[in-house]
Image (cartoon, rainbow, N blue to C red):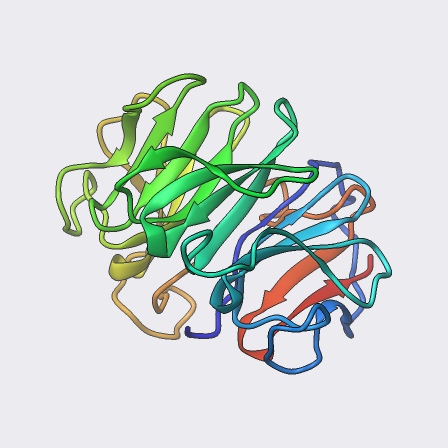
């Protein structure tokens, strides 16, 4: 997988506009080379930070979700890890606190699964036949899922099996009502949807109920100038454009170094 910044999710807090973070990161998961031991990761992708600074990592090439408590030197496998029939290249993970479960983008198996957070031995498929990379939840408990083969984002309310399209859905393309190979999604408090529109090298914002999106970053072709992007991946938005743990510390998935880095405030 290409090296990239993958999305972070955590409790929203207010951070002072002039806040600064340490220049040197601390390795809080992995960092012992590529591998499958409990102190290693292999091309990690999605990351979720819980209120107590416990992190959950989608350990993509190890086909598992690993939980790392704050200060731990080894992680604990909490989902998958026993072959591709359980999880196959999971790309993202979030926590549904209402049901005390993990919701996992099981990319290689083309499904989204719900996995009991405590002592779970197998997951339950809640959405099938979907090429899902990224997912997130809003404050009402609705689930937003990116389908990068159908070039759309769907919202699923509790108990809903079909969902409704909230971004894209008009085939692959670069018009304002289209997406191209979207990857990750973020939903703000107004239920506006932000999508990393990977194939179009841009980030799109779709207001709730909108028929087309607004380009909020990129959209000037692939490149490295300040107005361009090159296959964008994760997207997270709050007052500062990032998400942190409840103390304001920043977490970043370092994909090709097979680790997660924490930058203290």
Q: Position of residue 151 (x, y in %)?
A: 23, 46
Q: Position of residue 154 (x, y in %)?
A: 32, 32
Q: Position of residue 121 (x, y in %)?
A: 59, 43
Number of numbered labels in the structure image: 0
The quadrant of the rendering that contains the N terminus is: bottom left
* 61 displayed left or right of 97: left
Question: Which residue corresponds to the image point at 38% horizontal and 45% vertical from the top-left?
Answer: 195
Is 35 rendered above or below residue 176? below
* 53 displayed left or right of 213: right
Question: Which residue corresponds to the image point at 60% horizontal and 40% vertical from the top-left?
Answer: 238
Is 130 rendered above or below residue 60? above
Q: Position of residue 32 (x, y in %)?
A: 71, 80
Question: Which residue corresponds to the image point at 73% horizontal and 71% vertical from the top-left?
Answer: 39
Depth check, front residue: 209 or 78: 78
Question: In the rendered image, is residue 34 in sight?
Answer: yes
* 109 displayed left or right of 243: left
Figure quadrant of residue 226: bottom left
Furthest toward the right, the residue is 71
The quadrant of the rendering that contains the C terminus is: bottom right
Question: In the rendered image, is residue 197 in sight?
Answer: no
Depth check, front residue: 14 or 220: 14
Is 5 rendered above or below residue 240? below
């Amino acid at each position: 997988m290409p090296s990239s910044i993958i999305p972070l999710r955590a409790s929203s807090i207010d951070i002072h506009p002039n806040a600064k973070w340490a220049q040197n990161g601390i390795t809080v998961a992995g960092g012992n080379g590529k591998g499958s031991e409990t102190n290693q990761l292999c091309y990690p992708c999605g990351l979720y930070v819980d209120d107590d600074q416990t992190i959950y990592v989608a350990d993509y090439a190890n086909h598992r979700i690993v939980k790392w408590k704050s200060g731990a030197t080894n992680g604990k496998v909490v989902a998958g890890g026993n072959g591709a029939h359980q999880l196959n290249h999971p790309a993202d993970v979030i926590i549904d606190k209402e049901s005390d479960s993990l919701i996992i983008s099981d990319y290689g198996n083309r499904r989204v699964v719900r996995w009991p957070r405590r002592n779970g031995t197998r997951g339950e498929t809640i959405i099938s036949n979907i090429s899902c990379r990224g997912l997130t939840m809003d404050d009402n408990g609705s689930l937003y899922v990116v389908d990068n083969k159908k070039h759309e984002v769907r919202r699923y309310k509790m108990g809903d099996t079909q969902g409704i399209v909230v971004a894209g859905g008009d085939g692959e393309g670069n018009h304002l009502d289209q997406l191209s190979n979207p990857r990750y999604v973020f939903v703000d408090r107004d239920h506006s949807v932000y999508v990393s529109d990977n194939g179009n090298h841009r980030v799109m914002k779709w207001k709730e109920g909108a028929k087309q999106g607004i380009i909020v970053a990129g959209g000037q072709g692939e490149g490295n100038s300040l107005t361009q992007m090159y296959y964008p991946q994760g997207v997270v938005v709050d007052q500062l454009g990032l998400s942190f743990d409840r103390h304001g510390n920043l977490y970043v998935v370092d994909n090709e170094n097979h680790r997660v880095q924490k930058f203290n405030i």
